[in-house]
Amino acid sequence: MITGSESLGTAVASAGEVNGDGLFDILAADEFYNDDAGMVYLYLGSTDSDGDGLFGSGDCDDADPAIGAPTTALFPDADGDTYGDPASSAFVCDDTAGYVSDDTDCDDTSASIHPGASELCDAADADEDCDGATDDDDPDAVGQTAAFLDDHGDGFGGTTAGLYCDLPSGWVATSTDCDDSNASVNPDADEVCNGLDDDCDTVVDTDAIDQPTWYADADGDGYTDPDLYVVQCDVPDGYAAASIEPDCDDTDGSATPALSTRRTTASTRTATAPTRHPPTAARTPTPPPPTVVATAATGATRARLARAGTRAQAAAAGPRGALRLASRCC
């Protein structure tokens, strides 16, 4: 600090030769700088080779008298990307290192951020191209990925697509939902019998988890064959839900457990009805069952005759015989 009798421009002998160029260097004092605290400036000694009256950094070209002091403000380029910091400027010569005429750098601490740079999708949402927009707000952003609208929030997107750096709310990275209007339809859903492709595998109902079992009823008598069945959603022709009693002959609609039950009941009533005889009449002995002669008869005739003989035998045997006949079904 210089205070007292020294004044601006006064050489101070103690400055000596500071930079070793052989020229005497000057300390200039400003006693009124900063509320009379004063300030000292160091001016390195220089020559005026072109005789234009300018010395050192005050002459932008000391070999050309036509080029004198700097007249244009330049901007510091701290990151070396050739784009200057608009927040600071200085009147320096055009070839001064670290200064440029451009003042459009929005971040002079990063050489990758400047006008003309690629806007990148990044977690920091940096404005790489200095256009005032970042990431998804910048239509020039690169590195975006496809996203799909998940209209009902089941975690699977439909066909509405867009490109984004960051997934917006209600959007997902997959487009595997085959019906984005139905929350119960998606690749993770269970296929059920409803005529829809619930699990989006392009197959409808055939792999449903609730498929019922249908049993054959070829003769359409309402009684089913327990040994012949299919498992599927829709009932096929010639099939029905399982009947309480199985059909013993699914090729003959007239042969059913219901008919056997009626016959059994009738036979039981007949067999158990008391035979009334006149008081003085002798009981007539029960005739033996008819002899079936079917040597030359056809197979169907033999079967009818056999059934007739069997029924006659059962009737002769009483209620137990009738029940045994009924238990044979049909």
Image (tube, grey):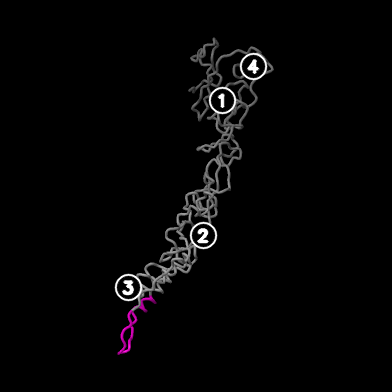
17 falls in the magenta region: no
Upstream in sequence: badge 2 or badge 3: 2
Q: Between marks 2 and 4, how big is the CA–CA gap?
A: 103 Å
* Residue beneath the point at 63% across and 13% down: 48
Quickly name the residue at label 4. Answer: 61
The amino acid sitting under disc 1 is: Gly
Image: 97 above or below 252: above
Q: Nearer the viewer, residue 87 or 177?
A: 177
Upstream in sequence: badge 2 or badge 4: 4
Residue 80's disc is 1
The amino acid sitting under disc 2 is: Pro
Q: Secondary structure at mark 1?
A: loop
Instruction: Point out the stretch of residues depicted in magenta.
Output: 265-285
The amino acid sitting under disc 3 is: Arg
Upstream in sequence: badge 1 or badge 3: 1
Disc 2 to disc 1: CB gap under 8 Å: no
Image: 179 above or below 114: below
Q: Mark 3 packing: few (<14 Cα in 10 Å), some, or many (20+)?
A: some
276 falls in the magenta region: yes
Q: Between marks 1 and 4, how big is the CA–CA gap?
A: 24 Å
Q: Residue 66: image x %, image y %? A: 69, 17
2 or 1: mark nearer the eye: 2
Q: Between marks 1 and 3, how big is the CA–CA gap?
A: 114 Å
Q: Secondary structure at mark 3?
A: helix
Q: Secondary structure at mark 2?
A: loop
